[in-house]
Amino acid sequence: MTFRDILGHDRVLERLRRSLAIGRVAHAYLFVGPEGVGKATVARAFAAALTCPEEPGEGCGGCPSCRRLKAATHPDAHVVEPDGQEVKIEQVRGLQKALAYRPSMARCAVAILPQAERLTLQAANALLKTLEEPPGETVLVLVAPTASLLPPTVVSRCELVSFTPLPQEELASFLASRRGLTPEAAELTAALAAGRVGLALDSEVGDLKALRERAWQYLTSAAEGPGSVLAWSKHGLEEMRRGRSSLKAAGLELNTALLSLARDVVVTAAGQPDRLIHVDLAEQYASLPAGGQPAAAQAVFEAVQAGRAQLDRNLNTQLVYETMGLAIAEANRGRT
Amino acid sequence: MSYQVLARTWRPQTFEAVVGQDHVTRTLKNAIGAGRVAHAYCFSGARGVGKTTTARILAKALNCRDGPTPEPCGECENCREIRAGNSPDVVEIDGATYRGIDKVRELQEKLQYVPSKSPHKIYIIDEVHMLTKEAFNALLKTLEEPPPHVRFVFATTEPHKIPDTILSRCQRFDFRQLTPAEVAAQLERICAEEGFTVPAEGVGLIARAAEGSMRDALSLLDQLVSLSGPAIEADDVAVLLGRADQALLARVVEAIRAGSTATLLEVVSGLVSRGQDLRVFCRDLLEYLRHLLVCRSVEEPAGLVPYSETVVGEVQAQARQFSLESLHRLFEGLRRAEQAVRGADAPQWVLEVSLLGLASLEPVTPMEDILTKLAALEEATRTPAGAPGPVAPREPTLFEIEGRGDQPPLVPPAALSEPDGPEDGPPLPTSSPKTPPDTLEGLWERLLVGVEQRAFRVAQLLKEGQPVSLDQRILTVRFTAPFCATYFEEDEHRRLVEEEAERLAARPLRLQVVRADEEAKPSASPDHPKPAPRAASPPQASPGQDHHDVMVQQAQELFGGTVTEEGYLPPASEE
Amino acid sequence: MEIRMPREALHKGLSKVQGVADPRAAQPILANVLLEATDKTLVLTATDFEIAVQASCEAEVVQTGRLTLNARRLYDIVRELPEETVHLVAQQEHWAGLTCGKASFRIAGMPADEYPPMPAYDAAQSIKLPPDAVREMVAKTLFAVSTDETRYVLNGVLLNLEGKTLEMVATDGHRLAQIVRDAKEPVSEPMNVVIPRKALHGLTRLLEPEVEVLEVVLQENHVVFLLPGAVLVGRLIEGQFPNYDQVIPSSSDVVVTVGRQAFIQGLKRVSLMASDKSKMVKLTMTAGSLTLASEDTEVGAAHEELAAEYDGEEFVIGLNARYLLDALGAMETDEVAIGLTDALAPGLLEPVNGGRYKCVVMPMRL
């Protein structure tokens, strides 16, 4: 994985390349942005740019050093993932010990913490000295969804790099050209991924079509009334679960698809059918009661958001979907 | 390749060079000069304001070859080693790694040793609040009887987590947050030395973005130079910080006011395609709302908002287009939007929906008007018992919209009001007037409420039913959705309804479920719990007639239209 | 890969390297030893990311190649083999087949490509070191190396080469050991590196008495020791070794000479009553005697007088008995000299007629 393989994030790459070129690489970075947008990927490419002897400042991807990075056997690249749910202080100490030595192969050592928000308070504090004044040639890259999830003392010692999702069209065109998807499939994938490259690349188009269909089924059932929600709940969940690692994972995935539909309903209710994500559903949106009432549409969106929050808190997926459905039903009745 | 960041290069090395903490440095210098240096100091304050820096300068002051002196030379071996972090007699440790009591004991053992080549052995403990209670207690002994050559400097961003017993044995210094002016001045000094050119406006932006921390400001400056080179424009700063300009923000606010949904979507789309951070945009929008509020509330806002005179005029003009309440509501709405966008996986959608939501709100009615309206409604619905009063037409009012989410509605919804006894507050326009419990309608209303309080989900489904008839022993309810019918045929759910019904009707009642496709017949007499099926013959009622059935009336109000047929379907036959 | 070699040769090579492999490392492949067969040699490598040891042995190479096998397991197998020719063959999926006499084994392995690379070094830049001297120097300084993991740069011994002078220094902040010896030939360029403790342990194990040649090459991030049939690579530690010159007293106001063995015995006895934590022993010097005293208020006290050569004023100082014993144990002479300036200045221990060896111990407040 090198800079050249990265899609989008032009500003970020320009900034990193520039720093490498003029020799102004900070020793601690914090990459923030929505999940799946590409932060960890860029961090890995950055590591290659820092350590590759063939193309320093860029990374070649093919030399023994780059290959070792890929295989995770590079002696100077340290990736600290959570041990279970957290990144513990012992792991930080282990990292500090490894960094106490001069790099074995490369010009500098690189340490990546891909889920830095999982640092325990102790671990984060223990890391402060290293972040501020690391031994020798070291670059640390912390990755987290937002800076607010880390102690300000940590954030203060890092250079902040913000990652934003790609515009839908850009992602769609990339998927069409580099991944050989049909324009229709590319549009759908880009739409459901909400601009997050990682997500888009992970998804199978066939799956996505089915996913959207399921989301639409759910939405229309819910709009019909509580009876239909429960009817859906009986077999819809089973279907949703198929092929996924857990009901919760399936629930989260479906929720994102639902969110895209709900957003479209709001936009339809606002009278802007040419700004839809799923342009092909324009008529269907209009047929929903909520599609004609801004307040109801808002309620639907909020219901889906609330559902997502509940899933994140590990509430029972079935219950979440039923409650969400009932709320959507109420919204479509005009009973917010 | 890796270089020293500005925050490190420009770390002050003398007391005089420390920015914005004169109250600390002056006192320390005096103390050192007078030979009255405390054994333990506690430096508290936010990140990046100078705690560790001052601690190191203090160490130099004490251990300099010329020391103790308020002006360490910086050149002798001790000073140089302290600066490089290499002095054997200045130990910097962090409270997270050294938090246990065993670590404190280890440290205490070492305290007996004379420093190897300096007059003092100095321990600088960072984020000392991380120490365990036991560790603090052990440390207490040392602080009570410190060895003469030992000095402690504790640094912390959370002084409230340090036990009082410890704090009382330290001399405490609170490091303040730096003002934007102080930060800006230092930035300009550094830029001059480093050969960077940044216009004053840009420096101001960085200084404000740093929120009181010098390190944060220098970090931002580093980023700027990395991105734009040594010649920086004000625009570069705005772009790096991702800040939106006032014109764009004003445009968005106007679009919300006018309900221009197309504009709002266009703006968001534009931000995304430029790779702007939507969270930063929300914050900027929120900040702009604050400026609007200030302009609306204050006669002379000039010093309170960061705009030039002409721009202030424009902002004021925009602010005057709103009532104060509207601005508050908009602020609140944006605050929630900012929160929602902050954690969102799909910030674009969340922002779009939030903005569209704000645009679709009706203009806010001032409080007095609302209260007058409520009083009028209250009057209107206080009619003699039994006769239903007219039901006011439903409008999306402020309260209903606000009632969603985390704001409690101003008026309690009907569902939570007591079924029996006088009402506490004025009823909502949509609440049905109270009818006695021995009618079908009356019982049904109360049943819905009662069941809802026991099991929300059951109640939701029960609402799907239409009450058909009520006699001495049986309550018949029809469900169009087969699933609902089955649901209430299940013992558990049926029993719940029956219990509630019994409580309300003061007699045991059986629930009879009728499916939509079957015919329901009214029960003939109390002696025949299983009436024979009969064809339905609903009484005809002419449209426009004053209908007594409340449910029908409500339906008419809700959906408009005219009543063509009204009546009860015959109860279903027993299986 | 396919080789044949006498079992003894393989055993010898494995014993040099297998101890370095780390079965508990985060990366599983570090538990393995890398076997590379080229030309007429089999090279065995093991590393734990801090040090790497390579041993080469003669072998009949039927086919060149590389593979890795669990170090401990391979060593145990080879140790039990009969004294015959070992035949090792690489098999599918990184497995290996080993036969020796009538015994045969199949051993699971991991891909050689995953094995961390040995750093390159320029053998032409090597500097010759006298093996005996190095052995002695390491033994006399290693004990003083810091075990504290906050100042990593102290977790090794400083090696200084200039002209014909070899110097090693180790310190943990409270005591220091410094030894100077001569090289046979001058070094072309001065060298100044901190060698991690682990590397020196490893070196000590490789420096058997018969070893007659020792060379060292200094790379930017590694130090490489070359011995006959073996190479030891140690990663260098980041940071600057503190300036220790000031710590070593250049002159002493007070010098006391005492019998080394008597001193050791006395210290051992008296320190039994010293506080467990500080191990402090009070030394009182008066004309002709050195008195050792210790006290732990809850446990008891001890007291012993030793004959000493001293004719000055009474002098009292508190020192850590453990540190003294470490230093005394490393010395070999009959007598040692204690140099002191005042109760708050470092104490200097030197072997009388023992060459340029100094141990410094920081005093404790009495």
Image (cartoon, coloured by chain):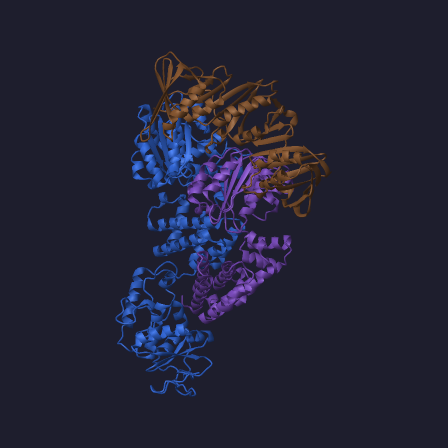
Chain colours: A purple, B blue, C brown
Residue C110: give x, y in percent of width and height: 63, 44
> B282 above or below C360?
below
In this picture, residue B530 sits left or right of residue A214: left
Q: Is residue B403 among the parts visible in the rendering?
A: yes
Residue at 35% of width from left, 49% of height from top? B294
> C264 above or below A200?
above
Where, quadrant-wise, is the C terminus of chain B in this rendering? bottom left
> A241 above or below B100?
below
Residue most toward the right?
C62
* Number of marks present in the image shown: 0
Q: Quadrant of residue B105?
A: top left
In this picture, residue A27 sits left or right of residue B433: right
Residue B46: give x, y in percent of width and height: 38, 39
Residue at 43% of width from left, 50% of height from top? B285
Residue A261: give x, y in percent of width and height: 51, 62
In this picture, residue A169 sits left or right of residue A305: right
Where, quadrant-wise, is the N terminus of chain B in this rendering? top right
Q: Quadrant of residue B425?
A: bottom left
Which residue is more in the foreground, C84 or A159?
A: C84
Which residue is more in the foreground, C94 or C220?
A: C94
> A171 above or below A24?
below
Which residue is more in the foreground, C285 or A139?
A: C285
Residue B57: give x, y in percent of width and height: 40, 28
Q: Is residue C97 among the parts visible in the rendering?
A: no
Residue most toward the top?
C311
Q: Quadrant of residue A299?
A: bottom left
